[in-house]
Image (cartoon, rainbow, N blue to C red):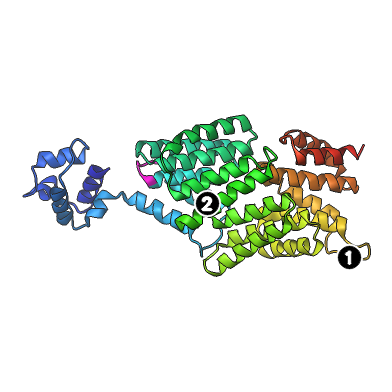
Amino acid sequence: MLGQRIKGLRKAKKMTQSDVADGIMTKSMLSMIENGKATPSLPALQAVARRLHVSIDELLIDPRAIEMKQVIEKINAPTGDYYAEEQIADMLAPYLEPAIDSYWQGRIYEMYGNALRFSNTEQGLHYFDLAEEIYKRLELRDEQISVQISKVYFLFFLRRYEEAYRKVDAMMIHQDVPLAPETFLDYQMLQALRVSVNEDNWSQSIDFLREGIRYMREKGVYSDVSNYHRLLALFLSLDGDFEAADHELELLEHFFLFTEATAFERILVELTKGTIAVHREDYEGVQYARERLVEVNIEACIHYIGYFEVYLCLWKDSKETLPFGLQSGVTNIWRGAHLWQVGGEYDHAMMLYALALAMRAGVGMDRRAEVEEMTKQLSPGRFKQEIEKTLAELS
């Protein structure tokens, strides 16, 4: 609070209330300001700032908010280091308490909630609630909707689809007032994901994403261009249009030539290329994607490495020797199970299908019951049917 900052600076400089108030206001008025019972006029505030030898910004902006802004910018820096969720949580933890009524406190809570996606999803929802409360008090409408979108993703991870759909429908009430471009793009992405795996409607997902890309071009806003083109390529491949999928990835690579893509964005593109290579049964494409992920050596990618290894082992020529085996692939998928089991529906399904294929080849049968139980939790549709069919062939 303003009064507390004035009081803190005054005491740090060993000044009395009379020293600060003299010629500006009465001592009693300064006392009321320091105790949050009165607000100074702008001229009086400027005079107090000069008396304390600080800028007016130092009085108006909480130093803790400045620290929060700096740590958030460090995490989001496009050319900075890659931080895993656990590292992000550790970096943000010192700013959870004591809370201040600031936009940056809301951002801290929101980012901390996102960092708990794999480790404690329910706790993540709690911090989203705290962020939303701050945004609501500060009347930051777009930020409120943004954190509501994050909540929906978490509910998807928890397989609480009905609750997630209710929240999406409630958000649609806000559409009578235009959203900020970044918030609209987040919302459009949510709609695309909603109708993809969960409703088995790739064509409608493609329409949502293409509409979002057109909107980016109209508004000149490219904050989420990587995810849009990447997911559009993935959905096009699922719809069987591999030529169009390749075109979207080419557009993305061209975009990267003129902007600074983060290391994580490039990793996601390699994952997408590898996954599309699986869909088109492109052995060399899968092999290249696996090698790129091994080079990056990020623990969060270990299950994707295993996923690619399973297909490479199943598809390899009988005369070819690989530096890994089918058991290695299965082991790597299970090593990353704590990630994909709380991930999106598509990731969940693709890992289960790879495990089912490995079991059909005689590897990983000891965990068949787990795979069958997790398959039951998938939404009805193409993926669940294919996994169930493969598992049935084991009997």
Residue 16 lies, in percent from the top left, at 14, 47
Residue lying furthest bottom? 257
At mark 1, the secondary structure is loop
Residue 118 lies, in percent from the top left, at 62, 44
Q: Is residue 245 magenta?
A: no
Residue 254 lies, in percent from the top left, at 59, 67
The residue sitting at 50% across, 32% down in the picture is 170
Magenta region, residue range: 98-103
Q: Amino acid at mark 2?
A: Ile
Instruction: Tell me if mark 1 has few (under 14), some (14-19) or many (20+) residues whose alpha carbon lies within 10 angstroms of its own.
Output: few
Considering only vertical position in the picture, is 347 above or below 152? below
Q: CA distance from mark 1 to mark 2?
A: 40 Å
Q: Amino acid at mark 1?
A: Thr
Q: Is residue 75 visible?
A: no
At mark 2, the secondary structure is helix
Q: Which residue is mark 1?
A: 321
Quadrant of the rendering where the C terminus is positioned: top right
Q: Nearer the viewer, residue 5 or 82?
A: 82
Instruction: Tell me if mark 2 has few (under 14), some (14-19) or many (20+) residues whose alpha carbon lies within 10 angstroms of its own.
Output: some
Which label number is shown at residue 88? Answer: 2
The residue sitting at 58% across, 33% down in the picture is 165
Image mark count: 2
The residue sitting at 45% across, 50% down in the picture is 181
